[in-house]
Amino acid sequence: MSGGFFGFDTALPGRDNAPSASAPGGTVHGFQARADADSFLGGGGLGGAGEEEDLAVYNWGEGMDTGLLEGGDDFNDETFGDVGDFSQDFQFSSQPAPTPAYRQQPRGPIASTKSHFHPKAQVDLFAATEDDFYSSRPSTKKSTKQNKKKEPEPLWAKASPANQWGASPVAQPRTPTQQPAPAARPPPGQILSLDEIEADLARTNINVPTPPPVQQQQQQPRVLTLEEIESQMVAGTPPPVAHQPPQAQHQQHASQHSIHVPTPPQRNTPPVSAGLNGSGHSQQQQALLDQMFPDLGSVPAPQQQQQVPGGQQAMAPSGPHQPSPEEMAHMEELHRRIAGKIEAMSKHNNLMGNSDKDFITRIQLSQLATADPYSSDFYAQVYSALIRRQQAADGQGPTVVQVAPGLGFGVGAPTGNRFGKMGTASMQRLTTQVKKLVSTTAKRQQSNMSNDALQGALGRVPRARSQVAPRQVLAVPAATKTKHQPINQLNQSTGPTRPALTRKQVMFALEELYDDVLEIEQMRRDAPPPTDVPAVEAWNAACVAKVDEMWNTLMVMEPLGVSNPHPFISLMNPLKGQRLFPRLLRHLPQQQCLTLLTLLIATYPQLDVVSRAPPPPVADSSLLTKADRLDRARREAETDSFLHHVIPGVDAIINQCNLGLVSGLLGICSQRMEVWKVGATRPGVALFTALLSKAQSLVRAPQDPNHPEAQQDPAELEQWHKMFDYFLQIILPHLPELFPSTQAQKVAFGPGAYLIGADAAGANQFNEKEGLEIERREAEVWGLAAALAVNAPEDQQTNLVAALRENILHSVTAARDSHTPRARAEMKLRNVNMFLHGLGLDASMVPT
Amino acid sequence: MLIFSFFKTLTDQVITVELKNDLCITGTLKSVDQFLNIRLDGIRVEDPERHPHMLAVKNVFIRGSVVRYVRMAARAVDTTLLEDATRREAHNTGK
Amino acid sequence: MEDAVNATISEPLDIVKLSLGERVFMKMRGDRTITGTLHAYDAHMNVVLSNVEESIHIVDVNEDGIPQAPRVERRSLEMLFVRGDGVILLSPTQ
């Protein structure tokens, strides 16, 4: 024994620099080939002198004792003084007094990688996991307990019972010489000797009735269907290893599977289980595999049954359902393929240790979690909030996984994912760790990523979390953007008129508006508490400023004739402008809403949906070219969108108007637009109807003496009547043309291109669904007619009926026609009645 | 993070992942990560004759980079909200 | 006016933003083209589209190695995520 190993005699000549070489008969790397005492010496020498190192005891095979070179001890007394007897159980620890219990512990043939003895310069060449690989370096840990390596708090411990039983000492008789060579295979938790294996085999064979000599199913091994297994259980066969304590059962498992290599007589696919379960991590892996392949759950089961070869299979036919041979063959084939796959995959088993997995989980969590879930996870957070609101009635819980309070983690099924396997304690631990990670990352980014740090940086700027937001290599801050300059400059050209906005400019302005709206919406959400008066004032001012900004971008205040279409109308033409409209209105004060409505009505004919309204439908769309069809579809979609998004907003504003305003707006209509043209479009009909009905409700409003302001000013009433008369005069001659059916008839030219008419024959050319759609559109115009009717003085009512006489007759006769589908006939009658009821008439009064 | 956020809302929905090798896999989205790796359960392959090796596979983990398209139901997506989220993201990263 | 708009568009993605919510045309690797309504995009040009029509342009080659007339396969999809690494260009449709 050299003093160098014990680190005492550092000054011994010739020892310091080449301790390993001078160790008697030893080579450092002989460790792998021959685990004898010399390698200990060499390894210890490398550890350097004077270091107070604890070296865990390493029991490397039984051959160790005999392999020890007992020579060269002549100077021991000189070195150590008289320390009395040396036993061969060396305690390579600096702790002076080895515990007696330890000393008596048999030096088992356990080739465990959990051992802590390792040459300093070497990592554990037999490490099964990366954990072991690194943790095998000498540590300052005091624990020298054999085979007890404490993993650094594995979060997955619960999921890996393998660690526990794999590391526990095994009290099984075995012959040291038959110990499998450790280097042959990466050592599993424990390696069983052949003896042991045979003993196990014998035991199982005893426990089980010996199978009949000739078993057909023996040739067809190891594939049992679930039904068979169930049937066996029903038949009352005790589980093969039920009599053994769980621990032993585990071991038996392992041994059973280890058998496969040496004695595979009845098994066709032994390597599977050998690869899977023989590695000492079978439980963990199985858990993992089960999780990944729940459908393969039937595979392990047959393997368990396999422990009892033949005997139980013989009972299988007594089961309730016996699969046919083809089924069996198919299942077998399937299982073999699955097993092969699993085997192929199993060579990657245990590449990562628990702490590796924890580490990666932490990294992933830290990337996912964020201090402000609403900024980087806006969609998922709001979406799940909306869903939750929907589900609130059902009493379902929140779907957002909260990593920590305030640290949103997005939606996801908490049960289905990998975190489900972790206990709450682990999750909490992760939570705090993630919190720390997030805050430190944020801090580092703040300190590192200041503009000064980037300015002039020509090289690569390392940046954390580049995955989340890739950034150009050179990010020299630009001069602060003058944000609102361009929008004002959209309007900057002088002169009374200028070209209309280009599509790009429109889109640009719309995006600015969307940004403004989003900002305002965010500001409204972030309202300060009402008690904090200065904050509320500041917040109010900020909101008003933002709304003003938005108002400017809307360009409503541009002169009416500045361009055709007016800039604001240009904004309302694209679909996304229409979708924005109701959101804009929500933030505008009422006065600005009114101004906006006035402008909209004054420039109504410039709207795409009015000036380029979709043509009436044709009977046979196959007559149209593809481009024509697409164009029609697009225009229809625009019209639908306008009616869906803009008109409700318009209605809402009109509803806030008093009679004077309404008559003013109607006056604008009569003066600024060709009422009959606009009225022939659905948006036009909708606008007129809204104005007329509001006026009617105001005129007919109950005169409440308590609310004098609710009473109509006689002057306003007078003005309204004048306006209405004028409007009616203009529209009356064109009234029949407003109906889609009439329009369709007007453009009906060419053979085959029969377009709908109010007559039943024409109507039948359309299928039922289209027919109903046409009636719905007719209803819109009948609604306008009704609004005219209720507003009209009596002398005008007769004019109205006269103007619409043809339409009424057509509708009523078509409705009474037996060829007309019932639903459509009812709609026709309802449409006509909508108008006639306004006059106190009914369709039934129309003579046939 | 926007698209990641988007995919998170699709968890437990049935989606179809079309890979760059034209393999189309339909299954229930179980999880997704920031690389848009996708885990699918209960999968079914379009055109199984062409891909018999996928028959036995019931769950897959798809590396994000091999994905060409992901098809999903329109009702599973709130397009207005998604556009807003995109604008916010552009606003935040652009400044 | 045009200049004013261009002055504020400093990044390519700013142009993509203008098409948000509008129909776009995309040219893809593998002789594919897509039109659809753009609902989301990110820095990688991952996009989410609705009402998608995809066209695959295929040139078949017969046994003699002579290419046949190109044909186009079309399909419609209601909602589609397109991974950005397959995107060649994106442009607004007219």
Image (cartoon, helix red, strand yellow):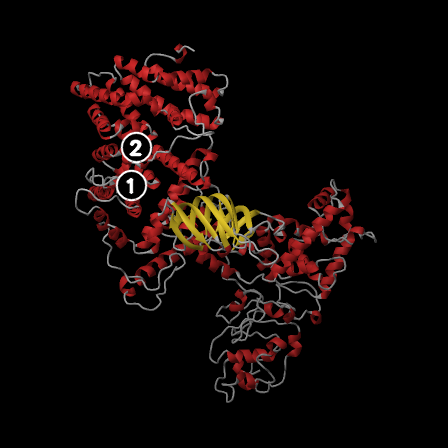
Q: Nearer the viewer, residue A125 or A549?
A: A549
Relative height, residue A399 to residue A54 (above, below): above
Residue A429: horizontal and vertical position, in percent? 44, 54
Residue plotted at (19% across, 44% down): A534
Residue A522: horizontal and vertical position, in percent? 30, 44
**Numbered marks: total:** 2
Q: Which residue is mark 1?
A: A571
Q: Horizontal placement of A652 versus A373: left or right?
A: left
Q: Which mark is residue A649?
A: 2
Q: Earlier in the sequence, mark 1 or mark 2?
A: 1
Local SS, label 1: helix
Q: Nearer the viewer, residue A463 or A781?
A: A781
Q: Which mark is residue A802?
A: none
Q: CA distance from mark 1 to mark 2?
A: 16 Å
The residue lying furthest to the front in this view is A750
Residue A431: horizontal and vertical position, in percent? 42, 53
- Kind of residue indicated by mark 1: Leu
Q: Neighbour class for label 2 at 10 Å: few (<14), some, many (≥20)? A: many
Residue A257 found in image quarter: bottom right
Local SS, label 2: helix
In contact (CB < 8 Å): disc 1 and disc 2 = no
Residue plotted at (59% across, 80% down): A38
Q: Nearer the viewer, residue A84 or B38?
A: B38
